[in-house]
Amino acid sequence: MTTELLTDLTIFVLAVLVGFEVISKVPATLHTPLMSGANAIHGVVLIGAMVITATVSAPYAYVLGAVAMAFAAMNVVGGYVVTDRMLHMFRRRPAVPAARAAHHDEEVAAR
Amino acid sequence: MSTFTTNIQLVYVLAAACFVIGLHLMNSPGTARRGNQVSTAGMAIAIIATLVILIHEGSVTGVGWTVLIVGSLLGSAAGLYSARTVQMTAMPQLVSMFNAVGGGAAALVAVYEYIHDESLPGGVLGTTSVFTVLDVIIGSVTFTGSLIAAGKLQGVITGSPIVFKGGRALNVALAVIALGTGAYMFTTASLPALLILVLASLAFGVMMVLPIGGADMPVVISLLNAFTGTAVAMAGFVVGNWALIIAGALVGASGGILTKLMADAMNRSLANIIIGGFGTGDTAVAA
């Protein structure tokens, strides 16, 4: 086993353990945005697509590289935008009852 | 390690830290949006660092740059358009689509590397081929599996479990073919074997998701999301890039935990969902 492979494996195992720990008690309403957020992160495969596309030198490789780039870019851009949209809609919701409650308090205070 | 390479690796570490912190912030409603922004920043950093490497090396041909730019522009445009215009109710299937293309990209990276190395005099390296094979299998399974999941949610394919006679046997056969071909490829570099591996894995992805009912689909998408993470980590081994290994392993593990949380929230066991068709509350068709 080469040193390089050993280093890669070490990083892999530690990253897996971090992945297990980083998710704690998540409220059910956040499940879908969190899934979508994680989905966007694995769009990092774009880097892999860039690395291979940089070495293309034959027609088959142009096709594979272009498709890989398009797929990965779609994953990254779409993933982050859709997650942001979900969370945007998510944050408004608690604000409405809070505003209503404040309004109610004011009314009570006025009386 | 040259100063340049060291600096790039440090930038990758920064990007990886952004992913971990971002994912952690997404655990609670108040910080979730900021978490996604931190994660986006990490992605931007990682992509820019990689661009810097490519420019620094200066070995990318004009055609290479064209392929790179055209591919990324097309993908970004498709992603941006669909993410902006999708109805709120159709978001799960869109996430599944993005997951499918992510898995597809991971599989393509391995396929390209395999064909590329196979033509070299040294052939395919022994240890790397393990990761190449795993990447092809997991990536291909996620690609078709997520497409089927998206199709089910969209209503293109019926949402109820599709179970037919011999379905299970076919699943087992496909798995055996994929694993057997993969094992063969560890010792012998062979393009036909690669083709069989890809086809068997693609078919397995379809067969895995078809028997699962519509109500369980979000859990399955989460599971496939974890699969893609793992495939991306394998792609990291194949191209030798830490950013891919860290981000992929992170998503693979956290996606697995999230899948379990989602299944628990629905009072369903994960094994029950994967075996599918039973007790989903949907009309389960007997085999």
Image (spheres, rainbow, N blue to C red):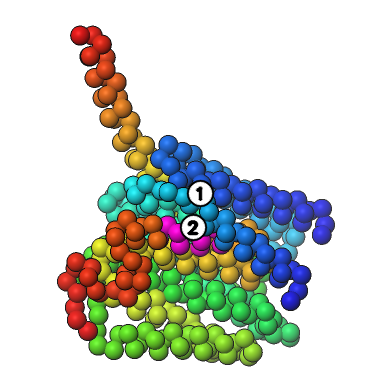
Residue plotted at (42% across, 49% down): A25
User: What residue is rendered at 42% in x and 57% in y?
Assistant: B258
The type of residue carrying mark 1 is Leu
Q: Is residue B214 left or right of residue A38?
A: left
The C terminus of chain A is located in which quarter?
Answer: top left
How packed mark 1 is, by other alpha carbons closer than 10 Å (few <14, some 14-19, many 20 or more), is: many
Q: Nearer the viewer, residue A98 or B270?
A: B270
Q: Chain of mark 1?
A: B
Q: Residue B174 appears in which quarter of the rendering?
A: bottom left
Q: The residue tagged with tag 2: helix, strand or loop?
A: helix
The answer to whether the residue labelled 2 contacts the one labelled 1, judged by CB atoms less than 8 Å apart, is yes
Residue identifier under label 2: B254
Quarter holding residue B66? bottom right
Q: Position of residue B148 (x, y in %)?
A: 33, 70
Give the residues in magenta: B249-259
From the viewer's side, name the closer residue of A31 and A89. Answer: A31
Query: Can I make out residue B111 in this image?
Result: no
* Callouts 2 and 1 on one subunit: yes
Residue B239 picture location, percent across and down? 65, 68
Identify the amino acid type marked 2.
Ser
Q: Main secondary structure of the magenta part?
A: helix
Q: Residue at x 74, y 76 (%)?
A: A1
Which residue of the protein is positioned furthest toward the top in this rendering?
A111
Which residue, given by chain and number where applicable, does mark 1 sit on? B23
